[in-house]
Amino acid sequence: MNRLFCFGLGYSAGVLSRRLAAKGWSISGTATTAEKAEALKQHGYEAFVFDGRERDSAIADALSRSTHILLSIPPGEDGDPAYRVYASDIAASPSIAWIGYFSSISVYGDSKGEWVDETTPPGPVTDRGKRRLDAENAWIELGRASGKTIVVLRLPGIYGPGRSAIDQLRAGKARRIFKPGQVTNRVHVDDIATATEAALGLASGIHVFNVTDDLPAPPQDVIAYGAEILGVPCPPATDPTDASLSPMARSFYAESKKVSNARMKNDLGVKLAYPTYIEGLKAIATS
């Protein structure tokens, strides 16, 4: 039986897990609290609480029985918590053949709005991007040393039901951030699951994919389109240096780039359900 263990069985990993469970996969994973772990158990998953610091022998035992590992916890100042605590268990597991890592397009840094792809040398400019690149490299080295397949999936802004411009507008919390020349990238959570599922069958080696949609676009256009299809007023434009924005939110506007998904389509055969935010927001608005 195929057994998937997810470090961070949350929004994105959860969509993939539901698909795989329906196909007979065994699903295990971690949550940050006992309440969240209990909610995962209600789906029939084996769930554990992971605080990012302490090794749990029960998690180590689950890893020894897993065939696939998905890493969906962002690295902190002291690195990737799953790597720091469980790298040796993962490397030593005879059953684990495949390791997937949800990284970020922030590893590319700022290209001044020009196109980048997987052959573009990483050049992160934010602490967040630098930590992601360090985590990528750590897992890649583990894969090379242990002979396990490593798949790095570089993700842009993630949206979907419950987490979209439509939801923000309906809640009255949408911000239309405007910076001249700014271009951002995004992907629907369902398409992340599609790409990840397609990558599960990759042969041994190191694989890197950008998992993004077809249309990099100014972020203010996304909010404006959401307001249009809902028939609500468009929020006023806000400068990205606005003090009310969180430091993380402001960091997104330190970079402008267009990210190519050609390798994902060509090598994995992925057909996006939501090739642009237009299809994605329409589906959410009418669901």
Image (cartoon, grey):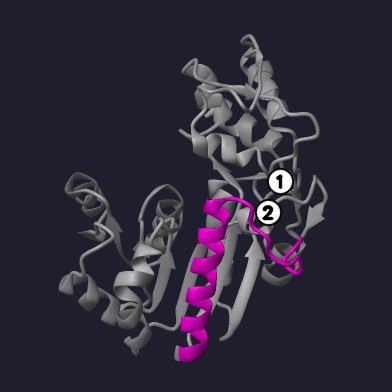
> Where does the image place residue 162, in percent across and percent down from the top left?
46, 33
Q: Is residue 147 visible?
A: no
Query: Badges 2 and 1: C-beta atoms under 8 Å apart?
Result: no
Q: Is residue 148 left or right of residue 268?
A: left
Vertical position of residue 20 compared to residue 252: above or below? below
> Where does the image place residue 209, in percent across and percent down from the top left?
65, 66
Q: Is residue 219 visible?
A: yes
- Residue at left 31%, top 74%? 86
Q: Is residue 214 left or right of residue 8?
A: right
What residue is shown with label 2?
A: 109
Instruction: Pick the residue in front: 175 or 282.
Output: 175
Whether 191 is among the magenta residues is: no
Vertical position of residue 148 compared to residue 273: above or below? below
Number of residues whose C-alpha sits closer than 10 Å to that of mark 2, classed few (under 14), some (14–19) or many (20 or more): many
For residue 275, the mark is 1
- Residue at left 48%, top 75%? 139
The residue segment tinted magenta is 117-145
